[in-house]
Image (cartoon, coloured by chain):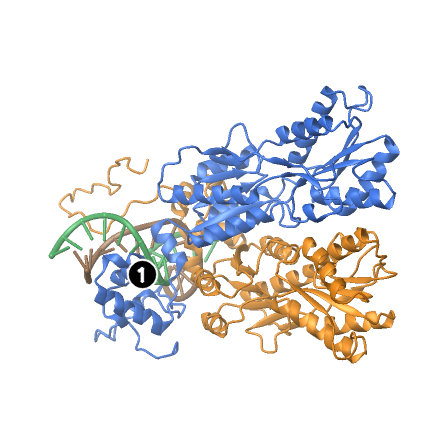
Chain colours: A orange, B blue, C brown, D green
Amino acid sequence: MVDTPFSPSVPVTGDSAEPRRRGSRKSAGGITLRDVAQLAGVAPITASRALNTPQAVSPKVLQKVREAVERTGYVPNLLAGGLASNKSRLVAVVVPTVIGPVFQGIVHTLTETLAAAGYQVMLGQSGYENSREDALLEAIIGRRPDGVVLTGIMRSPEARKRLLASGIPVVETWDLTPNPIDMLVGFSHEEIGREVARYLHRLGRRQVAVVGGRDERSQRRMNAFAEQAVALGMGMGAADGVPMHGVIAPTTLGQGRSGLVELLQRQPGIDAIFCSSDLLALGVMIEAQARGIAIPQQLAVVGFGDLDFARDLQPQLTTVRIDGTAIGQRAARFIIDRANDIEIAQPVVDVGFSIISRQSA
Amino acid sequence: MVDTPFSPSVPVTGDSAEPRRRGSRKSAGGITLRDVAQLAGVAPITASRALNTPQAVSPKVLQKVREAVERTGYVPNLLAGGLASNKSRLVAVVVPTVIGPVFQGIVHTLTETLAAAGYQVMLGQSGYENSREDALLEAIIGRRPDGVVLTGIMRSPEARKRLLASGIPVVETWDLTPNPIDMLVGFSHEEIGREVARYLHRLGRRQVAVVGGRDERSQRRMNAFAEQAVALGMGMGAADGVPMHGVIAPTTLGQGRSGLVELLQRQPGIDAIFCSSDLLALGVMIEAQARGIAIPQQLAVVGFGDLDFARDLQPQLTTVRIDGTAIGQRAARFIIDRANDIEIAQPVVDVGFSIISRQSA
DNA sequence: ATGAAAGCGCTAACAG
DNA sequence: CTGTTAGCGCTTTCAT
């Protein structure tokens, strides 16, 4: 098809002596706005307006253009449109990984909300190691997205600088950075750790431990938890601090099981465990069950995430809820507002968290 | 560095009296290939070649261009490049939803594999209802992606037709369609249903039931299972067929619990349950545990998906494994090969499945 | 190995 | 409300 020879579309005006121009190029063959405009009997720009700002053209023209679109099956080339208008209607979303339930809510909400506003989501996975960040960033900036949503990543100052220099609106999420690149929707991991420690203390627990992912944010929750716990006199004897079992993210149920095993070996007297994810917590619960350890009587378990299954467990899981949907919607709103030059009153939002008190603790 | 001022690239031709041309447009202000070329002292096209086909330029030029890129912080505009070359280096991936663990593997693998080959993934969520398909399709085709990966969706013939007409390479996955749009990487849901029925029959189970999502593919597994079960004489009395409890996708642990409750009410004698997801299976197991029903002695449970946690449950979950990674890699390979005009010998691949026999059945 | 010209398909800017 | 013109930033084609 591509090599179908077709006669030059230059009308023979009698001036056949005109030399073949160089640099001429065959079209890809698709239907373009020109074709539609021609069929509708209007100028291309008018067809463009009929599609993008229907209220700016006469009903008659609108009708004709729509008919032409219908008949030709025309689909606007957004690459061309984006290049011309300097608006790509593309938003880059970067997460460490889509594996694991943690960032699903955000990705889902963003994709949904942005799609409703006519934006497409470009997905990037940074991995938990800060290695591919540069290549990823290049790929993102190269597409000139109308916004970038960062979830728990992009720590390298180099990367931050480039993003900033690119002028693309950036929303960082899932954390409260002291100096955000641009906009921010997050919550305090430290505060969560402390609050959970206080919560367990109030329940009378005194020998607490931790099973947590080794990624930075998880660590910060865990460390804050441990500090607060020690401050409240909940360490396993002041000297030892809080026993912590670290696992590699993304966290799994199996890691929760082996985490409990390991912790009990180290410190048989443990009466409460704070896990850095609900999946870990579930693992801890299953292992406890297998060993005949009663939850919450002998062992209190607190998770993180309030995944959908948490309230359906037996016993129901006490956990920390993060409103991923709220974060996603807020982030989407930020980007959309920016794209429309709407003033953003408060570009830093703390969505907070809540401890959902159920049976396991 | 970035703000090193360099003089405007418009040469002053001395003709300052020239009237302001209409239609003239200010550049967005970013650094373009022209700026780089100018700084390197070469023509734009040469700079372009230095970046895209380094072996086609002299080492000297290469060096100079690279320096210029470094100094300016230039990032190629892929929108412009895509428009000119008719290659967007964008691949659209469509899933019903990213919520729920089912399609995570595919999305992850695709994003990863394609990124390594220089492609970006555009994410689309079709939802489980076939409503937004049209708008989504329009958005996808409009970006002229180099490929589309469809996962368990796009049933409407209208949509199929448009995709086909667009000429974009399409890989359908997660199913074995009798007449694929283009390429296909999947497995047979019917065969899975039948095989599980045979498996349970071999184990001596005779009163089987089903908890399954109401989405189409799940239904097909379940119906095939039921048919085969009846054929093997495993119905609850030939007349009744197999008790089935339908739930709304995406499936949850809680639905598994209530599913078991409901099924036991209807048919107390059930000795095996096939669930359309591992999460449902986990729910069934938890509910059984809560009711003192021994698994697998009194009740066998089979899941679907072989999620990471399946082997860590107590008892370990017998389930159907789908190799999402294989599907993703294959699909990515298809698209990349197509983009490079590499002949695809076998555009339809059945990746099969396996029943992972563990303790729960 | 390098360059000049043209144009990918669309929209901003201006004029009527 | 409609049209003309000139590009967006890049790569193709052809020529040297």
Asked if B274 appears above or below B20 in the picture, the reply is: above
Relative depth, front residue between B22 and B231 = B231
- Can residue A225 be seen? yes
| Number of marks in the rendered image | 1
A344 left or right of A44? right
Q: Quadrant of residue A324?
A: bottom right
Relative depth, front residue between B355 and B87 = B355
The residue at 62%/50% (across/down) is B98
Tell me the crowding category of disc 1: few under 14, some 14 to 19, or many 20 or more residues within 10 angstroms, Cα based: some
Asked if A211 appears above or below A257 in the picture, the reply is: below
Residue B361 point in image, percent of width and height: 73, 36
The residue at 88%/43% (across/down) is B291
A92 left or right of B296? left
The residue at 27%/72% (across/down) is B39
Label 1: which residue?
B51
- Tell me the quadrant of the picture where the C terminus of chain A can be found: bottom right
The residue at 50%/32% (across/down) is B180
Residue B310 point in image, percent of width and height: 69, 45
Relative depth, front residue between B265 and A323 = B265
